[in-house]
Image (tube, rainbow, N blue to C red):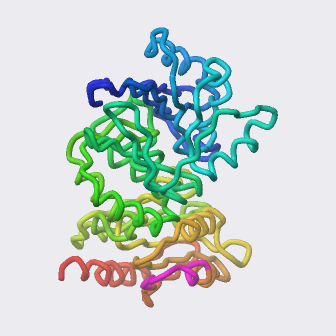
Amino acid sequence: MNQQELLPKGVIYAGVDDLDIDLFESQYDVPEGMSYNSYVILDQKIAVLDTVDARKADEWLNNITKILNGKKPDYLVVHHMEPDHSGSIAKFLEKYPDTTLVASGKALNMLPLYFEDITFNNKMEVKEGDTLSLGTRSLTFIAAPMVHWPEVMLSFDASDGTLFAADAFGKFGAIKNETDDWACEARRYYFNICGKYGVQVQNLLKKAANLTIKTICPLHGPVLNQNIGYYVGLYNTWSKYEVETPGVLVAYASIHGGTKAAAEHFAELLKQKGCPKVATADLSRDDMEEAIEDAFRMDTTVLAAASYDAGVFPPMEDFLNRLAHKNFQNRRICMIENGSWGPTAIRTMTKLIEPMKNIELMPETITIKGRMHRDDLPKFEALAEKIAEKYKN
C-alpha cells in the first residue's frame, strides 16, 4: 500500500516497516510485522513528525535525507515518547543539530530518561491549544494524556483536516502486509494497549468531535483518508466498553483434553441454538491477545477451565487477570469447570471476576468430573438454550 497516495499534498510519508520483530513491546505477537510511521511537512518551515524505533533508525534517516533533498528541517515534533517512536531522536539531532525539538512538557522531562548523556539545547514546549506555524500550514496541539502514556500530544492541521494521531487509530502489522481488514488488528491493538484507558480515549474523542477530520495519520498502521466516521465510531464503541458484535466467546483452559472437548461441544450447541456469532479460544495455545479482543468484542464469554492446585488452571487465571487489567466490563459471563476429585475452578474464577465492573455472572454453571459424560449432556443443552434466549428475544 502506497501511503504517499493517501496523504495530502505537502505531507510526505517517511515511515519504515519492521519485518524482523517477533514480539511488539516484548509481549504481543506480530506475525505481519510492525510499522513505525513518521511524516515530513514541507512548507516555508519544515517539520519532521516523530522518529522511529532505534532498530530502524538508519533506514528512517535515509528516508528523511531523500525527502529533504539537501534542505534542513526546522522542527522535530515529538507526539509520543515511547521508544518505538522516540528511539531515533538522538541520531536525528546529531545529523540536524539546529532543529528545534517540539513536545509537551512531560515529554521534554522524559528525554533524560532515554538519552542520559545528551543535551537538548533547542526545545519548544507546547500544550493544549498551542499552534506551530509552518507557513501555509499550522499545527494545533491537542493533549491526549494516557492515550496511552501521560505525555501524549496529537496535532491537527485545519488547512486540510489532517490529524496526526500518535498511537490512536494505530494497528499491528507492517504497511507492506496491510490488508483491507483494518478493524481486526486495530481492535487487537486497541484493547491490548489502550483498552485500560477508555475514559481518556473518550475525552480525546470529544475533542475530535469539534474538528473536521479528513485524514488520520497514526504512528502505526495505514493512513486513513476515507470513511473517517467508521474508524471514529469503532473507537467510540471500544472506549465505552460497549458490545461491537453480539455473540459468544468460549474460552477454555484444558489440561488433558476433557475440558476442551466439553467447551467445543458447548460451542457447537450455541451455534445450533442460533447464537449469531460463536468464537472459541484455547487459552493454552491460541493468541491470548486475540482472546482478549474477542471478549471485548462480544457480549457473552463462557469460561471453561480445569481445576488446578485447589484453584484454576493458570492459562485461565492469566486470561482473567489480563481482562481485569484492561478494565473488562459490561458483559455477561458463564462458567464451566472440570475437577476429577475436588472442583475448584468456578470458585477461583468467581473471585477473579468479582472486581470487574458491571458483570452479569450467570448463576447457571456446569461441573464435570474428568470428562463430559452422558448424564452431563442435558445440563449443556439447558445452559446453551439459556444463553441463546437473549439473541432470540
Q: Which quarter of the picture shows residue 279?
A: bottom left
What's the magenta region? 352-360
Residue 211: quadrant of the picture: bottom left
Quarter holding the C terminus is bottom left
Task: Determine whether 4 is above or below 30 in the image.
Answer: above
Q: Quadrant of the N terminus?
A: top left
Let me know if residue 133 appears in the view. yes
Q: Name the residue at 35% across, 72% down.
A: 299
Q: How many labels were placed on the picture?
A: 0
Q: Is residue 289 left or right of residue 245?
A: right
Q: Is residue 281 above or below residue 170?
A: below
Q: Which residue extends farthest top?
A: 70
Location of residue 26 in the rendering, given as x and y in whole percent from the top left corner = 64, 43
The percent position of residue 64, horizontal first and vertical second, equals 50, 18
Reply yes or no: does residue 124 show up in magenta.
no
Image vertical order of residue 106 relative to residue 34, above or below: below
Measured as percent of width and height from the top left, residue 252 is found at 51, 65
Q: Choose between 175 and 115: the one closer to the eye.
A: 115
Residue lying at 61% horizontally and 62% vertically, measured from the top left: 315
112 left or right, relative to 36: right
Along the horizontal axis of the image, is 211 left or right of 52? left
Given the current orientation, which residue lies at the most extreme left position?
393
Camera-side residue of 47 and 92: 47
Q: Is residue 356 magenta?
A: yes
- Residue 30 x/y as whole percent: 51, 39
Q: Nearer the viewer, residue 69 or 343?
A: 69
